[in-house]
Image (tube, grey):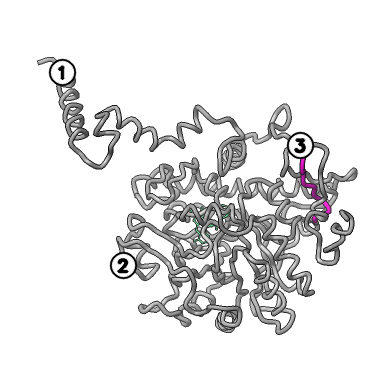
Amino acid sequence: MEAWLVGGAATVAVLALLTVHDLVQRGHSIRRVYPLVGRLRYLLETFGPELRQYIVTNDLEERPFNRAQRSWVYQTAKGVNSAIGFGTQLDPSRPGAFHFLPSAFPTLHDEAPTLGEAHVIGAGRPRPFAVRSRVNVAPMSFGALSAAAVRALAVGAAEAQCYINTGEGGLSEHHMSGGGDVIFQIGPAKYGVRTPDGAMDWERLAAIGALPQVRAIEVKLGQGAKPGKGGILPASKVTREIAAIRGIPAGEPSLQPNRFAEYHDMASLLAFIERIKATVPVPVGVKIVVGDPAFVDELAAELARSGRGPDYVSVDGSEGGTGAAPPSLSDHMGLPLTDAIVAVDNAYRRHGVREQVTIIGAGRVSNGADAAFVLALGADLVNVARAFLFSLGCIQALRCHTNECPTGVATQSTWRQRGLVLEEKRSRVANYARALQEDLMVVVRSCGLRSPAELRRDHLEIVEGVGQRRRASWLYPYPADEGVHMRDAA
Ligand SMILES: Cc1cc2nc3c(=O)[nH]c(=O)nc-3n(C[C@H](O)[C@H](O)[C@H](O)COP(=O)(O)O)c2cc1C
């Protein structure tokens, strides 16, 4: 028989079988009523995000990052021309738009080098951390990310003199493979520093804190995408290697408690931080999502009163990303980064201890203007998570929680990780990091400043509508000026 005839008959037979299966199955109503064609709906739903990206949405529409933002990362990572032609596509009068105030006398390149003075975290600690780059890699665990992704980030970040943060999945050889600075994060399950019965393994923590490459320890109180909820890693992502690093069984979901057992109020939190400080020589920080600003005010008051508290506060905006989270928390919990940074910066200023603490901000930063915005509002450093994933080839398929990330970035499937070639992607990470550092300095120089540390709320205006704009220092007054604009308005 002719081959095409055999092929045709086989295809018809498969389609007939699928039709019968659809008619008799009970799980999907659409397929029971519309056998075979009903499957198209599920297929299109599965590939919906990618299809919309290709044929439906314009450059500024997609979320959380639009195509224009992603393209800038892709282009800088590949080292190709990332300039835009013909002018901005953004409407400068839309509410929420921001612009910096350019100086008539911009700073010359030589007067403001890209990597200027380092920012020191924990100057009073036995081993302070001099951070070379103002923009660094945010916490993302090995588990949420693949080994290939963590390695490429670790090597690329080290090349660009950025630190990486382990995230809450423990410390792996992949994090150390770049030889650069590493911040070790501890989540409520204390992966990597937990005893078999789930208590804190202080000896193990001391050993990690003594590693020369580990430059700080971070206690994760909260994360913007899921405040009040512990990390979630689906069973499909808990491989034997990940289970061994975390100290949990393989093939079962890794669900962290939503708070450390070690603290439950300010006094016990401070005692926990102080004990960590007594165990390791490096600075100790906390990662938080801001809710009621009274909490950060109390944190700052305690530093002023007793000298106790974290060496740095890493502030995650509610717009922050995640490997997996419940939508109600991602969509409706916590302050956005703008308000959160101001609350933390003002709290430490109000109590006269701003110089003793470092503030790090994270929340949908992808280019230099975004980073400058966060620094101008009150941060000293900026953490970047998802934009670094774009530099690795992430296409925003929104499937980090499924183990089916098509680009090998947020999956443990070895087959999918084949797509992520270390030699290629490490240089993309480094290229993007350097471009981001330089893009930040382009804004800094244009404002007539010499360092990102000089950016203030006075350099920034936020648009409220056509013809209506406010200095950020008016919308978000520094403590000394609090109440001034109320008088203005009266
Ligand atoms: C895949 C992925 C994994 C993450 N894992 C962690 C984590 O282990 N610990 C943590 O504190 N934050 C985690 N985050 C949040 C990021 O550190 C960061 O705070 C947040 O995404 C905001 O930064 P971005 O807007 O630049 O993405 C993760 C984010 C992503 C996208």
Mark 2 or mark 3: which is in front?
3
Q: Is residue 453 magenta?
A: no
**What residue is pinned by disc 2?**
249
Q: CA distance from mark 3 to mark 1?
A: 65 Å
Q: Quadrant of the C terminus?
A: bottom right
Q: Is residue 52 visible?
A: yes
Between the C-alphas of marks 1 and 2, the distance is 50 Å
Q: Which mark is residue 371?
A: none
Q: Residue furthest left?
A: 1
Q: Amino acid at mark 1?
A: Ala
CB contact under 8 Å: marks 1 and 2 = no
Q: Is residue 366 left or right of residue 424?
A: right
Give the vertical position of 134 relative to 60 (above or below).
below
* Element type at mark 2: loop
Task: Tell me the number on the disc at residue 3.
Answer: 1
Q: Which of the marked residues, 3 or 1, is nearer the chain's N terminus?
A: 1
Q: Position of residue 231 (x, y in %)?
A: 45, 62
Disc 3 crowd rating (10 Å Cα; few below 14, some 14-19, many 20+) is some
Left or right? Give the position of 234 relative to 112: left
Quadrant in the rendering for residue 170: bottom left
Residue range of the region highlighted in magenta in the rendering: 457-465
**Which residue is painted at 79% across and 52% down in the image?**
472
Q: Is residue 327 left or right of residue 364?
A: left
Give the CA separation, mark 2 to mark 3.
54 Å
- For disc 3, the marked residue is 93
Query: Residue 137 in the image: x percent, y percent?
Result: 58, 56
Left or right side of 347 for 414? left
Task: Report whether the residue tagged 2 is closer than 8 Å to ligand 1.
Answer: no
Outermost residue toward the top in this view: 2
